[in-house]
Amino acid sequence: VSEGRLLAALRGAQVDRPPVWVMRQAGRYLPEYRRVRAAAGSFLRLCTDPELAAEVTLQPIRRFGFDAAIIFSDILLPLSRLGVEFAFPDEGGPRLPAPLATPEAWNRLEAAGDGGMAHLAETIARVRAALPEDVTLIGFAGAPWTLASYLVEGGTSRDHAVTKAALLSSPEAFDRLLDVLADAMAAYLRVQIAAGVQVVQVFDSWAGTLSAADYRRHVLPSLSGLLRDLDGTVPRIVYAGGSVHLLGELSDVSCEAVSVDWRTPLSQAAELLPGKAVQGNLDPAVLLAGPEAIREAVVTMLATAPTRGYVANLGHGILPNTPIASVDAFLAAVRGQQ
Amino acid sequence: VSEGRLLAALRGAQVDRPPVWVMRQAGRYLPEYRRVRAAAGSFLRLCTDPELAAEVTLQPIRRFGFDAAIIFSDILLPLSRLGVEFAFPDEGGPRLPAPLATPEAWNRLEAAGDGGMAHLAETIARVRAALPEDVTLIGFAGAPWTLASYLVEGGTSRDHAVTKAALLSSPEAFDRLLDVLADAMAAYLRVQIAAGVQVVQVFDSWAGTLSAADYRRHVLPSLSGLLRDLDGTVPRIVYAGGSVHLLGELSDVSCEAVSVDWRTPLSQAAELLPGKAVQGNLDPAVLLAGPEAIREAVVTMLATAPTRGYVANLGHGILPNTPIASVDAFLAAVRGQQ
């Protein structure tokens, strides 16, 4: 089928086998990525140079034949359009030199203009031109809650305690912050859609750090608004990490698919997300355990997956120390090869 | 009642209000703790000097009148009896200079003797002698899975990927490791019980990192064995972090109570853990959000708690930067004061 397996599965159609791709499939576990990354000099240049970004986006398609490519970037990049400064040091995660910890700081976020995205549109055009017709191109953005946590904590966090305290002690100002981020990300995704991405994925990586009550009250309105803003454009996937307790909340979000991790049984996700496709959910750690463990885990995963509306993937980004042979074993199992 | 509220609640009896204590209640958020810690010179000395350990165990009881004291120690300490070396640097979590990453390393763990625990018995005796009759003394140990993760990773871990890969690639050897740890912790807890602790809590802090299927297959047998070993001794609480998807598994464990975090609604825990008391579950981050947010969160928590068999607590250890006034506000709300 020329539309490709991913688009077919996202509209609930029958497919010959589940479409499969892997979060962070363009990344450090690939030797060809590490070569381009080293030559680029900086992570930021790799993301913003259309030739380099297109090249690393395409590398995993060439090597593995995934059913989808995802534009190489980072969820923090579009925050620069709001006046936020950040750095990607070679070791450790991204850092904000000046975390935004107070309502006053949130109010200083500048309204996003439409400028500064030409490189992204060019990357998307280059990738689309190079992709086989049945390989779907995915664009992405961070969800407001996950982006807010980076802004408030100044980087990744184990417990997100500063962000949660900000949410609870300044709920109205925090909700406004989430709305500003939602509007900016909707605009960012519309630029990607106009340039040619065929599916978008919104990453709420830290969804699972909140109780269902707080998620519903504080996070869901802005996330729902962001996704409703894209009604009628392209299919939308919401990745929600650690969200086994949030399926009731996520069922209310306007999207075609929810991506869950290994703590959420696929059968439970399909049952509690009626009308939506389900994506996931292999633990990336399984890919460190050797081909037999991988095959067994994939067979178990597929046995609990819905027969329609299912996209095979990991439950979180692939780990940088994953052996190439493990990805081969994962794909062979999903494709029903021995 | 001279037995105290905690013991009454753990056997499902009516109490005038829920018993309340806080995980890590003896710790860095207390100025009197920081003074003793500084004078002790090292964290290890603080744990193993009966006079100092008893003092910091009693500090939060004097200040706050909690319904329970918990012996000051660390879950890694009894591993030294298995020949494991570790260090508690002043910054960051505990570190093992030589992580145990292979089945060969696990097989070299020495059988635990009964020696080297005189200081612990003396600490327990000192605390019991100083505690009011209705304040219950809790002893504790780490659960096999959580201890194994420290052993294999060499410290705390974000994703526990090395441990999971070890579990999946060497399942039989890993299960033996868990059994060795379970036997050692059962012996360690029996020493504490003989010395006078009235309740034990087993910390499976990293329970929630696994899928329910892997938890049931690999982790539950050793955890269940450890707890069955203590049948007929004192009431047992199992703390399982991030375990909203594991309540079915935990319902099978021989214990009087399960301690859950804020991602598990208390009403759901009570329903899925028939015959067991429930402990928890306030997000420690709430204690950074000011008295009004704290009061509101506690009222919501208590409204969903079972009327019998409930112990008020946090869902994880109290954060080091928690203001004293926040603990006062938390306690006033639990005690129904305004």
Image: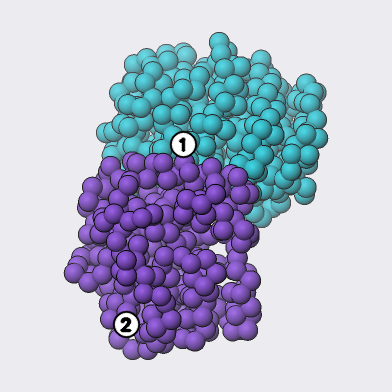
Chain colours: A purple, B cyan
Q: Is residue B90 left or right of residue A239?
A: right
> Which residue is tagged 2?
A195
Residue type indicated by callout 2: Ala
Which residue lies at the image location 52% right of the left edge and 77% below the top edge?
A: A56
Residue A135 appears anywhere in the view: yes
Of residues B133 and B167, which is closer to you in this image?
B167
CA distance separating discs 2 and 1? 42 Å
Q: Position of residue B132 (x, y in %)?
A: 53, 20
Which residue lies at the image location 50% right of the left edge and 25% below the top edge?
A: B237
Q: Position of residue A45 (x, y in %)?
A: 53, 84
Secondary structure, mark 1, is: helix
Residue type indicated by callout 1: Ala
Q: Is residue A103 left or right of residue B23?
A: left
Which residue lies at the image location 78% right of the left edge and 47% below the top edge?
A: B98
Tell me the subunit letter for badge 1: B
Q: In this picture, is B39 found above or below A91?
A: above
Which residue lies at the image location 46% right of the left edge and 36% below the top edge?
A: B212
Of residues A298 and B233, which is closer to you in this image?
A298
Tell me the subunit letter for badge 2: A
Secondary structure, mark 2, is: helix
